[in-house]
Amino acid sequence: EIRDLTMKELENYDIGLMLTDVKIQDAEMPTDEVNEAYKAVLSALQGKEATINLAQAYKESKIPEMEAEVKSITLNAEYDKQKRINEAKMQIAMFEAMYEQYKLNPDATRMRMYHEALQEFLPGTRVYIDTSKDGSLEKLLPVESFYTEEEKK
């Protein structure tokens, strides 16, 4: 069988050689060094496959976790965006309402804004309004007296 296959190959190449006989000599087992090297190669290939499988399993376990984290971050960002938009709209509405009051009575609105700023920056401090032209002490009134109980809270 080996002779026939080899003859066909020689005829295909047309090199002018003719095979007359094929003899197989005694084949010996490879040496211990070759066996050990072969086993080492097989072991390395198995280790490679095991490592690839572990990495693939890790990847497959992490992908859903990361997708969930991305979704969570995206939802939080969307919530923060909407919150800031709503806060900005509220500030615009407050400013427009204050501006309308200012147009009706600029002096009173300016004075109220001044006292509100004082209360914000000096919490717990009593603020008095001098209602006299000459600055006499008997005409000092506490600012709190102008607010209702709800406004004081």
Image (cartoon, helix red, strand yellow):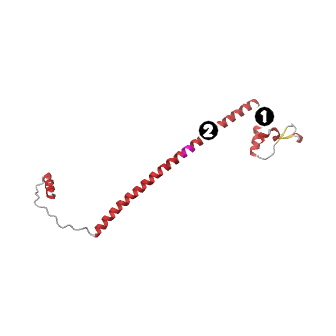
Residue annotated with mark 1 = 108
Instruction: Kindly report the secondary structure that dominates the magenta region of the rendered protein.
Output: helix
The amino acid type found where label 1 is placed reads Ala
Residue closest to the eye, 57 or 9:
57
Which circle marks residue 85 in the picture? 2
Q: Is residue 74 above or below residue 58?
A: above
Rendered location of residue 139, percent (x, y): 88, 39
The residues tagged by marks 2 and 1 sit, at their Cα atoms, a distance apart of 31 Å
- Which image quadrant: the C terminus? top right
Q: Which residues are magenta?
A: 72-76
Q: Quadrant of residue 33?
A: bottom left
Is 135 displayed left or right of 8 in the figure?
A: right
Residue lying furthest bottom = 32
Where disc 2 sits, the SS reads helix
Rendered location of residue 123, percent (x, y): 76, 46
Residue lying furthest front = 1
